[in-house]
Image (cartoon, helix red, strand yellow):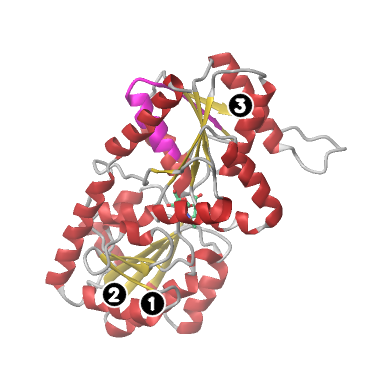
Amino acid sequence: MKIGISCYATLGGSGAVATELGKALAARGHEVHFIVSGTPFRLGYLGYFMDNIYIHEVETTSYPVLQSSPYDLALSAKMADVISHYDLDIIHAHYAIPYAVCAFLAREMLGTHKVRIVTTLHGTDITVLAQDPLLRDVIRLGIEKSHAVTAVSQSLIDQTNELFEPACPIMKIHNFVDVKQYRRLESPTLKLRIAPNNEKVILHMSNFRAVKRIPDVIETFRLIHQAMPAKLLMVGEGPELDAARKLTCKMGIEDDVLFLGQQDEVAQLLSLADLLLLPSQKESFGLVALEAMACGVPVVGSNAGGIPEVVEHGKSGYLAPVGDTESMGAYAVSILSNIEKWHAFSEAAMQRAKLFTMEEKVSQYEELYKRLIHYP
Ligand code: GMT
């Protein structure tokens, strides 16, 4: 098949999933065309050249009369160009806006073309953007004009159904992890540098947006720190970063919190951790939790959105209501202070991650594409 993929190329779970999907489809022999604003970050990990992966960068025009560069229109035009030039069978949009809407516009531009639009909902479009009534109708258009819509969790399907009552059922395809790449990679020297006195290593990784509840990460860590020697690794960047630094100083724990910024060697970094904290307000899936679990790291977090579909409370981690940092702190201490319990949770986390294998989920997408092509 000839498959176009359009996604956020910058850091984030949706870009990671879209890119890993594209790489896996190419490895199965399909022709894959990324239509993006820049090279997707996980494509850099390929380490070799594949002649069936194409990258089409969207260029925007600026002109004094235009108030801003019309990125979405440039993206639609680029999609139309790639669909027509390479005769694509499928265009897979990761997010309703702008990608599904742009795919629809591209198809309209072409008049008639066999290309089928598949849209994957990743969360923010439904849980955040759709709360704005103006954007809601644009998102509805993206959903209704797609030939198939998938979502990354049952929780997201439920929320989408509640908001949009779509005519066609939304298909659940959970996110996935490549367990060959994401496995426990012990780095004793590195661990000794980070935790020279054998402190417990706690990790949080996100885009530091308000929905991630960074103050809850820090408060939960403070409770752990009160109970045992511990270090917190904060990985990622975003709007809440500055306030987070200030909060650690205010709490007097700044010497034990390391802000590492954006990092690439995610599996190695996750493997350093004894625990992952994910206390989000909203989280359609929580890819970072799955990746951490594949590396044998138990998760303590909130029970928001799709997190309970990934982390089994009391087995591979513990989940508490959003904002209940007291319970999160107590749960974390209970795992970290009992080595047998930690090993049991770590093993359960790795086993759980094996239920979200890349092979199975990629096959589900592949089957969906085939169905759309053969039974349009
Ligand atoms: O977590 C974010 O804010 C980034 C966002 C994205 O666009 O990558 O993540 C969303 O998609 C991921 C991949 O499907 C999910 O694992 C995240 O849970 C989801 N984020 C939210 O729902 C807040």
Viewer can see residue 269: no
Label 1 or label 2, whichever comes before in sequence order: 1
Indicate the amino acid at tag 2: Ala
Real-space CA distance between mark 2 and mark 3, rounded to the nearest whole angstrom: 47 Å
| Residue closer to the observer: 78 or 117 | 117
Is 35 situated above or below 69? above
Label 1 or label 3, whichever comes before in sequence order: 3
Q: Which residue is mark 3?
A: 79
Real-space CA distance between mark 1 and mark 3, rounded to the nearest whole angstrom: 45 Å
Q: Residues within 10 Å of mark 2 (few under 14, many from 20)?
A: many
Q: Residue at x 62, y 45 (%)?
A: 140
Q: Residue at x 86, y 37 (%)?
A: 64
Label 2 or label 3, whichever comes before in sequence order: 3
Real-space CA distance between mark 1 and mark 2, rounded to the nearest whole angstrom: 8 Å
Percent from the top left, x then y, of residue 320? 36, 74
Provide the residue span drawn in magenta: 18-35
Indicate the amino acid at tag 1: Thr
Q: Residues within 10 Å of mark 1 (few under 14, many from 20)?
A: many
Indicate the amino acid at tag 3: Met
Judged from the image, the secondary structure of the residue bearing numbered disc 2 is helix
Q: Which residue is mark 2?
A: 332
Q: Which circle, 2 or 3, is nearer the viewer?
A: 3
Percent from the top left, x then y, of residue 370? 39, 24
Viewer can see residue 206: yes
Mark 1 and mark 2 residues within 8 Å of each other at the beta carbon: yes
As for residue 271 lying within the magenta part, the answer is no
The residue at the far left in this view is 340
Q: Residues within 10 Å of mark 3 (few under 14, many from 20)?
A: many
